[in-house]
Amino acid sequence: MYRVFSLKNNLTYGPIIGGQVIPEDTETINTISSDVKQTYKGDVFQLHSEADKETNTTLEKNDLLKKFVGLNIVSKGFITDVFTPYERNIDGQRKLFYTVVIEKNEKHDYDYSFIFCEFDNTWGQKLETINIPYEVKFTGKIEKLRPGVVFLQDCKMIK
């Protein structure tokens, strides 16, 4: 089973059967079991802009954006910065992570959100040797959203 989430008329919950999404109107992200893969199919760089168009108040926008936390994304963009690696305690073990900035275009475009994407240490050698801006197809899970910024964790580059 596979679930699709996106904004506006594309905010759809349900399994894909034969290439079609079968809506389940009463389901919310809180009622979906963790064994079901959840993916946001819209443009992650436009998430905030789309939310602005659909809501009248900051409260409404924040409520709408909460629905996207925990969803997986697949997108393309440009790595425009790589931060110094840092350690975090995960399940009682110290692990090294890299945060990179990914933008829709090679240079910052204020019409789009930018992404902080967290990669684990297995990506360290690649991230430390790329030439910026670096075009990339990537995947990750939406951790949180702030005005103009999408934070992703468990990021991976896709070849």
Image (cartoon, helix red, strand yellow):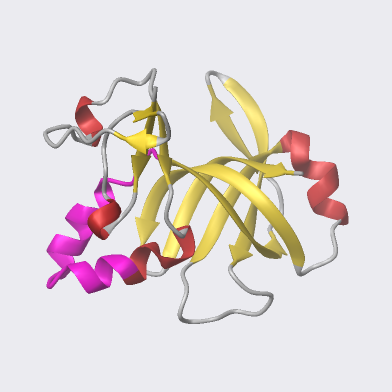
Q: Would you say residue 20 sits in the magenta stretch?
A: no
From the top left corner, tell me how far across and down residue 121 is, in percent. 73, 36
**Span of residues in magenta:** 50-71
Foreground pick, 39 / 117: 39
From the top left corner, tell me how far across and down residue 139 is, in percent. 59, 44
Foreground pick, 89 / 35: 35
Instruction: Indicate left or right for 85 with 44 as reference.
Output: right
Instruction: Indicate left or right for 135 with 67 as reference.
Output: right
**The C terminus appears in which quarter of the rendering?**
top right
Q: Is residue 94 above or below residue 106?
A: above
Q: Is residue 75 above or below residue 105?
A: above
Q: Would you say residue 63 sits in the magenta stretch?
A: yes
From the top left corner, tell me how far across and down residue 79 is, in percent. 69, 62
- The structure residue drawn at horizontal position 20% and vertical position 26%, both measured from the top left corner, is 31
Q: Is residue 81 above or below residue 41?
A: below
In terms of image quadrants, where is residue 26? Answer: top left
In terms of image quadrants, where is residue 100? Answer: bottom right
- The structure residue drawn at horizontal position 64% and vertical position 48%, both measured from the top left corner, is 138
In terms of image quadrants, where is residue 108? Answer: bottom right
- The structure residue drawn at horizontal position 47% and vertical position 74%, both measured from the top left corner, is 112
**The N terminus appears in which quarter of the rendering?**
top left
Foreground pick, 157 / 147: 157
